[in-house]
Image: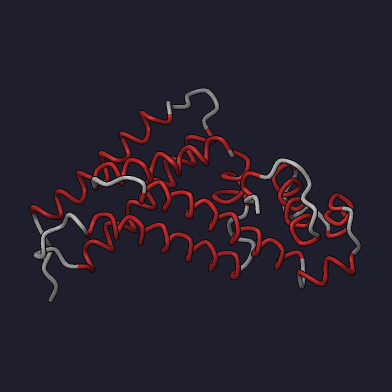
Amino acid sequence: MELLLFTSAMPVKAREKILFAALELFTSHNYSDTTILEVVERARVSKTTFYQFFASKENLLTTLVEQLAGEILSEVQDAIEREEKIPHKGYAGIRRYIQLCTEREAVARFLLVSSVGFSTEVEEVRRNAHIRFSHLIYQTAQRGMPQSVSDTAIRVVARGMVGAVNEVVIQQIADTDNKMDIDELARLLNRIVVDSFTMLALNPLHEG
């Protein structure tokens, strides 16, 4: 099955049609102004069919954010796993993330900016996505860290790196006049990540 992230034409199955239609409407207009009627009309399904899959428009939004975030992070994980050396893993993961957010700019803006704060359920999904992203960074960094560095310290730095990367991506998609080259941006961010973990390895924080 084609990922929603890469789907460019209306799918065949009803649930995928609704998600695809919602993504088009939420990114071209916005969530608040979009009605369920508009979604089902775009998807060419009935309201009855809609409620077979989603309890409400908010439930649709939550599902959409969860699916898109999961697809992006799976792509990032695949990019990391294809590399053997730790520094290359970090660069590959960051580059893939930036690439997806740049090539699917409307989706990235929807996930990182326009869908923020609509409900506690959406924020929980967003928080879980951040945790998964930081865990990918943690797993990659942990392999090259000395035993003197605690897992807690590695996890804290990994969480900080997620925030830094997302902030740069938000600025990248917001600044239409001064966009950086993907490779250059990935190298800079990877250098920040590597330097942060190098400093942690050289100056480990001790628990207790």
Q: Residue at (61%, 45%) from the top-left corner?
A: 107
Residue 40: x %, y % from top left: 86, 57
Q: Is residue 114 above or below residue 132?
A: above
Residue at the image position 53 percent from the left and 68 percent from the top:
124
**Total numbered badges shown on the rendered structure:** 0
Residue 141 is situated, as x and y percent measured from the top left of the image, at: 24, 55
Q: Which residue is drawn at 48% across and 54% down?
A: 74
Apparent side of residue 140 relative to residue 133 in the rendered image (left or right): left
In the displayed orientation, state which residue is furthest to the bottom: 208
Q: Is residue 164 left or right of residue 15?
A: left
Q: Coloring scheme of the render? A: secondary structure
As rendered, which of 21 and 202 lies closer to the eye? 21
Residue 86, x across and y down, in percent: 24, 48
Vertical order, 151 against 96 (above or below) = below
In the picture, the quarter occupied by the N terminus is bottom right
In the image: residue 132, left or right of residue 88 = right
